[in-house]
């Protein structure tokens, strides 16, 4: 049980973090491209 | 000096900066330290220190580099005040001193890749003897030269055609190779035992302060935070580029790669070892080489009955290691080159100076393992001081002003709150004091003559070399400022 919880905690923060920030970066890049220069 | 060359896009910047962060430490040091510190018990503080050490310092480096457009000497002088340019010189020197021996590590990786491809590695009767024969021969010098030449060529080509182009290829390939190796490793029989060990926490380890200090050390050495390298690449980010989001992406991205490498190595070792997996995976060897250069080649011979398949996976592993080392080496060479450029020399002249100095000053480490270990110890611990100097520069500037004007200034996609002030003014300094004290005090316990500056790994050699370098840079402080101002900075 504690192994699964640690796996979820560690990968959730690290891999979850990288996924969230990649998605945010894509969103902001798209927004910047759509904005008039 | 007006900045003319920039990374072409956010992705060019991110992939190049990831190249700094992802190094050999993600692959060999991480797995060894996890094994020595109780598997899952280590990963919990390791994640916490990513949030309270690495990411705040990566944000700081991006912000200082972007706002000053100068290499560490001028950047720290401009942020903290003219009297403190010597701190920037120390940061630049530490990373350059690491470059001198890191190119040797890069050379080892390239050599083992060549050995794996040629099948030479699998013909060795003993991998320990193979390593000993290689490391005491003239080959490390030859491969050190090859690493310096590759690095020099990339830096000479400039930011876009050199650094960005090389990193786009190398970092992408590295990630693909690591995922292929991960998929192979987790499908080996009994690989689950390795994964279980990696993620099972043990209470006695969580309560041990040394596990927490090792987790902080791993973050300090592995993410590239506080080295001045990210600060140097940030010179080339466009004004409209964001700081905080990119910094978070680098921190999480770097530790994601460590996790992938950790799962791969633990799965492989547990699947293919008889009953000595933990002893082998914890083995350090000279300069952390035991697991990577002695034990893993042996494991690759056991991966399957097919020599071709074993050769392919061993080659891919050492290719990934070579790519990881090269991308970090580029950033160290660029830091040294950019520092000279800031004093008025051309990129061409600067890279020739850096290449010649890199090869020459790397020679003692290539030829003598004790010298290598000494430099790794002195400047590895010196990085913690570099991190402290970066935090000091921001404190001197005014953390709240820095946060509002620079980090949350033009181009920022996400705004950083007041929590950042607390991290920089309180938590980073506490971590520096605790970590430095622990490493230096510990070093007195493993050497009775802890004061002797001529010993390989002790307090005396660290303090003597730091003091020598700091004294020299304090004396040169006025010269730094004069020349940097003269060049229109």
Image: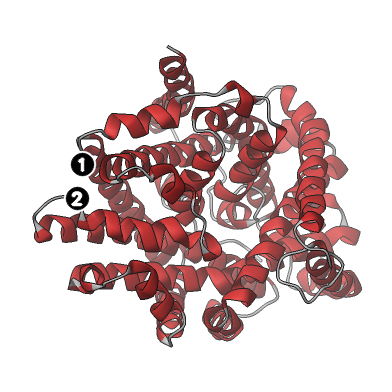
Q: Mark 2 lies on which chain?
A: B
**Marks 2, 1: nearer the viewer:** 2
Kindly report the distance in space between the C-alpha atoms of the residues bearing marks 2 and 1.
Answer: 10 Å
Q: Which secondary structure lies at badge 2? A: loop
Residue B413 locus on image (x, y percent): 54, 29
Residue A24: quadrant of the picture: top left
> Which residue corresponds to the image point at 29% horizontal and 43% vertical from the top-left?
B268
Contact? badges 2 and 1 (CB < 8 Å) = yes
Element at label 1? helix
Residue at 54%, 76% in the rendered image:
B347
Image side of residue B216 versus residue A12, left or right: right
Residue A18 visible in this rendered orientation of the protein: no
Sequence-wise, the earlier of marks 2 and 1 is 1
Tell me where residue B74 appears, x and y as whole percent.
75, 62
Specify the label residue B184 is tagged with.
Answer: 1
Image: B72 above or below B111: above
């Amino acid at each position: 049980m504690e192994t699964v919880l640690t796996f979820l905690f560690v990968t959730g923060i690290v891999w979850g973090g990288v996924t969230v920030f990649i998605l945010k970066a894509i969103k902001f890049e798209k927004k910047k491209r759509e904005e008039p220069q | 000096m007006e900045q003319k060359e920039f990374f072409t896009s956010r992705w060019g910047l991110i992939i190049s900066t990831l190249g700094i962060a992802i190094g050999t430490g993600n692959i060999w040091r991480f797995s060894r330290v996890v094994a020595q510190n109780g598997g899952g018990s280590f990963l919990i503080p390791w994640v916490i220190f990513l949030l309270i050490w690495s990411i705040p310092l990566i944000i700081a480096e991006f912000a200082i580099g972007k706002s000053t457009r100068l290499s560490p000497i001028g950047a720290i002088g401009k942020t903290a005040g003219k009297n403190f340019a010597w701190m920037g010189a120390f940061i630049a020197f530490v990373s350059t001193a690491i470059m001198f021996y890191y190119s040797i590590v890069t050379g080892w990786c390239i050599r083992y890749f060549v050995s794996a491809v040629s099948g030479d590695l699998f013909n060795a009767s003993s991998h320990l003897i193979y390593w000993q024969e290689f490391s005491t021969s003239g080959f490390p010098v030859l491969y050190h030269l090859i690493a310096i030449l590759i690095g020099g060529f990339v830096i000479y080509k400039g930011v876009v055609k050199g650094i960005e182009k090389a990193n786009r290829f190398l970092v992408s390939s590295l990630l693909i190779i690591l995922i292929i190796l991960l998929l192979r490793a987790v499908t080996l029989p009994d690989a689950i035992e390795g994964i279980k060990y990696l993620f099972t926490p043990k209470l006695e380890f969580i309560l041990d302060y040394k596990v927490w200090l090792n987790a902080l050390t791993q973050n300090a050495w592995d993410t590239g935070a506080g080295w001045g390298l990210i600060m140097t690449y940030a010179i080339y980010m466009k004004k409209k580029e964001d700081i905080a989001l990119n910094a978070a992406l680098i921190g999480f991205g770097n530790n994601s790669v460590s996790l992938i490498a950790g799962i791969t190595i633990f799965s492989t070792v547990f699947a293919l070892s008889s009953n000595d997996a933990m002893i082998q995976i914890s083995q350090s060897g000279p300069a952390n080489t035991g697991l990577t250069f002695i034990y893993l080649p042996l494991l690759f011979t056991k991966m399957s009955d097919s020599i071709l398949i074993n050769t392919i996976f061993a080659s891919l592993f050492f290719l990934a290691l070579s790519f990881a080392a090269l991308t970090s080496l580029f950033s160290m060479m660029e830091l040294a080159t950019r520092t000279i450029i800031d004093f008025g020399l051309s990129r061409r002249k600067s890279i020739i100076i850096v290449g010649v100095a890199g090869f020459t000053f790397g020679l003692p480490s290539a030829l003598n393992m004790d010298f290598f270990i000494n430099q790794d110890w002195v400047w590895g611990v010196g990085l913690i001081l570099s991190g402290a100097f970066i935090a000091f520069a921001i404190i001197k500037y005014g953390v709240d002003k820095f946060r509002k004007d620079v980090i949350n200034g033009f181009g920022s996609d996400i705004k950083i709150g007041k929590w950042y002030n607390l991290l920089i003014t309180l938590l980073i300094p506490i971590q520096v004091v605790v970590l430095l004290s622990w490493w230096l005090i510990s070093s007195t316990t493993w050497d009775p003559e802890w004061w002797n500056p001529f010993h390989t790994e002790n307090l005396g050699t660290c303090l003597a070399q730091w003091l020598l370098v700091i004294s020299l840079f304090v004396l040169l402080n006025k010269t730094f400022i004069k020349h940097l101002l003269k060049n229109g900075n």
